[in-house]
Image: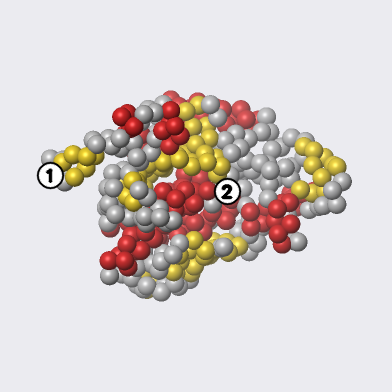
């Protein structure tokens, strides 16, 4: 599928070294103020070349909205958009035309389609996440009116990790450093590690944490379309993502029910709430009104700038050294992508819930 969502639906197109990447958003509620500057700012957070620890590919990533907006407001019709590619170095990939790069999708795409675009990975490139960021920005514009905020941040790079609960950090500090980590000291250590790894021609992975505040209770389905399953599916569709957990996640495996049950109580306004939030804001697959928080694990970028063994398309052993411009760590630029997938998921489930009530 090249489409995501049921009512709020994003369909994407394009390749890394093609003319443009883009998409169509269907199901956008009518009458929403379309803040193009905000959409562009979200793309700027994802764009390449923004710091010394990201790829040096220099793209403006300028959004062009083609339809679905009139006099600054959404019309309810499909919103079409493109972002043109302007700084491709396709020749950097010529030595990869007839080989399968380790841990890339070269082999699997070739087996599925019998043809592949070797330039920058084609459709498998992380550049395709541009369309997700546009869809996510549109979803955020709607969620903003409903008092729902989504904030992701880098919580781990390699073995350097934040150790405290997310509530103990000022998440407004996330955008104050190149790593997008709300802890200045840890951010410096992470940046130094990424710089070291880059100098060695290697790459490194990490974890992004995401917090959704203001989500109403009642979103999600009781059986196969549980809200946490939808969020997990959205996150696992992002390039290089290898793991997802929400709430206490895998920590539950070593704990007792008496330690982690979220006891109900009334707050000072008389509303039912919970004393703790080990469940991560979702119980029985349905949101309970508490903060939804989850973690997404990213593998090291597969392209490393050292010689590797592989085989060509005929199965003959060979060696190669990758060229081109690549991220030594995907985490800093993946933060807005995680937020975007979360925003589209939550908005889609809000619209689904509205349809059920009607």
Estimate the x, y position of residue 40 in percent, counting from the top left: 44, 56
Which label number is shown at residue 288? Answer: none
Viewer-proximal residue among 171 and 115: 115
- Residue occupying image coordinates x 41% and y 41%: 246
Residue named by callout 1? 269
Write down the quadrant of residue 254 in the picture. Answer: top left
Mark closer to the chain start, 1 or 2: 2
Is residue 84 shown to the viewer in this render? no
Estimate the x, y position of residue 15 in percent, counting from the top left: 63, 59
- Please state if 233 lies on the left or on the right of 116 as rendered: left
Residue named by callout 2? 239
What distance separates the C-alpha of mark 1 from that of mark 2?
43 Å
- Please state if 27 lies on the left or on the right of 24 as rendered: left
Q: Residues within 10 Å of mark 2 (few under 14, many from 20)?
A: some
Estimate the x, y position of residue 94 in percent, counting from the top left: 78, 52
- Residue occupying image coordinates x 78% and y 53%: 97
> Quadrant where the N terminus lies?
bottom right
Write down the quadrant of residue 141 in the picture. Answer: bottom left
> Quadrant where the C terminus lies?
bottom left
């Amino acid at each position: 599928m090249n489409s995501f969502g049921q009512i709020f639906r994003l369909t994407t197109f394009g390749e890394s070294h093609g003319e443009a990447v883009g998409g169509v958003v269907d199901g956008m509620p009518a009458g929403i103020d379309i803040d193009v500057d905000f959409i562009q700012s979200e793309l700027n957070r994802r764009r390449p070349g923004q710091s010394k620890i990201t790829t040096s590919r220099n793209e403006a990533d300028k959004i062009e909205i083609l339809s679905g907006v009139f006099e600054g407001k959404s019309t309810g019709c499909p919103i079409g958009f493109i972002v043109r590619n302007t700084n491709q170095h396709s020749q950097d990939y010529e030595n990869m035309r007839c080989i399968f790069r380790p841990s890339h999708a070269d082999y699997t795409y070739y087996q599925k389609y019998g043809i592949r675009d070797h330039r920058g990975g084609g459709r498998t490139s992380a550049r395709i996440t541009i369309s997700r960021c546009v869809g996510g920005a549109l979803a955020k514009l709607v969620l903003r009116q409903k008092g729902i905020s989504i904030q992701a941040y880098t919580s781990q790079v390699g073995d350097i990790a934040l150790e405290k609960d997310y509530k103990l950090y000022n998440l407004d500090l996330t955008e104050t450093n190149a790593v997008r980590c709300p802890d200045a000291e840890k951010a410096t250590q992470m940046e130094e590690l990424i710089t070291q790894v880059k100098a060695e021609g290697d790459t490194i992975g990490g974890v992004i944490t995401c917090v959704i505040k203001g989500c109403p209770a009642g979103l999600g389905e009781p059986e196969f379309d549980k809200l946490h399953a939808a969020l997990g599916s959205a996150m696992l569709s992002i390039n290089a993502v290898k793991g997802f957990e929400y709430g206490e996640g895998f920590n539950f495996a070593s704990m007792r029910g008496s330690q982690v049950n979220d006891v109900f109580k009334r707050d000072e306004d008389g509303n039912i709430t919970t004393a703790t939030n080990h469940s991560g804001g979702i119980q029985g697959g349905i949101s309970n009104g508490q903060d939804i928080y989850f973690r997404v694990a990213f593998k090291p970028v597969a392209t490393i700038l050292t010689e590797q063994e592989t085989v060509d398309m005929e199965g003959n052993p060979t060696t190669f050294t990758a060229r081109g411009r690549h991220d030594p760590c995907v985490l800093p630029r993946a933060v807005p992508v995680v937020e975007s997938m979360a925003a589209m998921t939550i908005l889609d489930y809000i619209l689904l819930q509205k349809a059920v009530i009607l």
